[in-house]
Amino acid sequence: MSWNKRHLLDIESLTADEINTVLDTATAFKAVGERAIKKVPALRGKTVINLFVEPSTRTRISFELAAQRLSADIINFSAEASSLKKGETLKDTARNLEALNADIIIIRHSATGAPHFLSRFLKSSVVNAGDGAHEHPTQALLDTFTIREKKGKIEGLNVTILGDILYSRVARSNIWALLKLGANVTLCGPSTLVPKVFEKMGCKVTWNLEEGVKDADVVNLLRIQHERQRKAMFPSIGEYTSLFGINKTRFKRLKPDVMIMHPGPINRGVEIDSQVADCDQSVILQQVTNGLAVRMAVLFLVNGGKGPQEVAAPVAT
Ligand code: CP
């Protein structure tokens, strides 16, 4: 088990072994986070920059905390208060950040491929924190980490991703990760948001809610990505909720041990009712907690760490 990549750009290009290396390294860092002293010196002297050009709560803050727990210096770049507003290009912005000796640049951007673009000319490591509707690799890693932690495995599980698949980077990264780890993936939602072309990736596609969720061990709910939809994809939010929203009545028809997930932010009363979002089988906040350990693992690995076997050493020093 070993990691040799300088960047984390997507899940598509990772092997199952590399995904498992991240998950196992995250398990080791989660154990560190349960100790009295949670900080380790693994990235001491390194500089990490959060280059977020789109809004974020969970991802930005957990990367910030992850860098701090690893003893790195972390800078939060604010797009609104930056020279991007004066016409500076993303390339020039990133090269200026690198000129300040940034070791790792974490980027969230509305343009698909923005992290891949930076990785072609930067010497710094690049981590994708979400690029357009393309990928959100650390979300998929924390989601698979949470499934494995709660269900004890991923292979053979039936995982349904329900909602706006077309515009969701979370869906794409989850599909790649789950299929590589041997899960059965069903995509469900309105036909306009769940095109049949996803079957080519190896998923089952259904536009019928009952059929989509009846055998699910895990239901991962997605919000409607209004910010990326360029035209109306369904008649109204009310109709979406009446056909695909998970309320208490629908929840009772799911498998008794079903696990409810959501990457957040949740839209209560739209894709999920509060009684479901806050029930015992919901792991929504545990996903957020696990995001910290997963992002510590990612920063550790892109900085040259090889795997979980190296996590114990820095803790002991
Ligand atoms: N899940 C997720 O990416 O949340 P944020 O947009 O708050 O980072």
Image: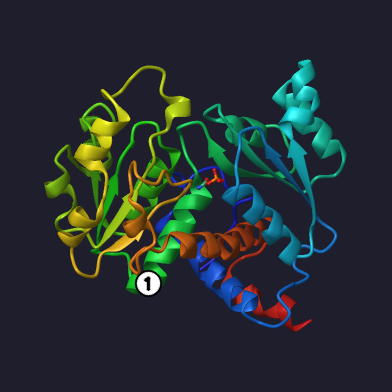
Q: Quadrant of residue 115?
A: top right
- Vertical placement of 119 versus 38: above or below? above
Observer-nearest of 50 and 230? 230
**Foreground residue among 227 and 295:** 227
Residue at (51%, 68%) from the top-left corner? 1
Residue 90 point in image, percent of width and height: 71, 25
- Relative to residue 59, is residue 269 drawn left or right? left
Instruction: Tell me the quarter of the picture where residue 315 sits.
Output: bottom right
Horizontally, is 301 left or right of 259 in the view? right
Residue picked out by circle 1? 150
- The residue sitting at 55% across, 59% down in the picture is 291
Is 65 rendered above or below residue 109? below
The amino acid sitting under disc 1 is Lys
**Vertical comparison of 17 with 85: above or below:** below
Circle 1: is it few (<14), some (14-19), or many (20+) Cα within 10 Å? few
With 11 as the anchor, is 195 left or right in this view? Answer: left
- Pinpoint residue 207: horizontal percent, then vertical percent: 17, 37
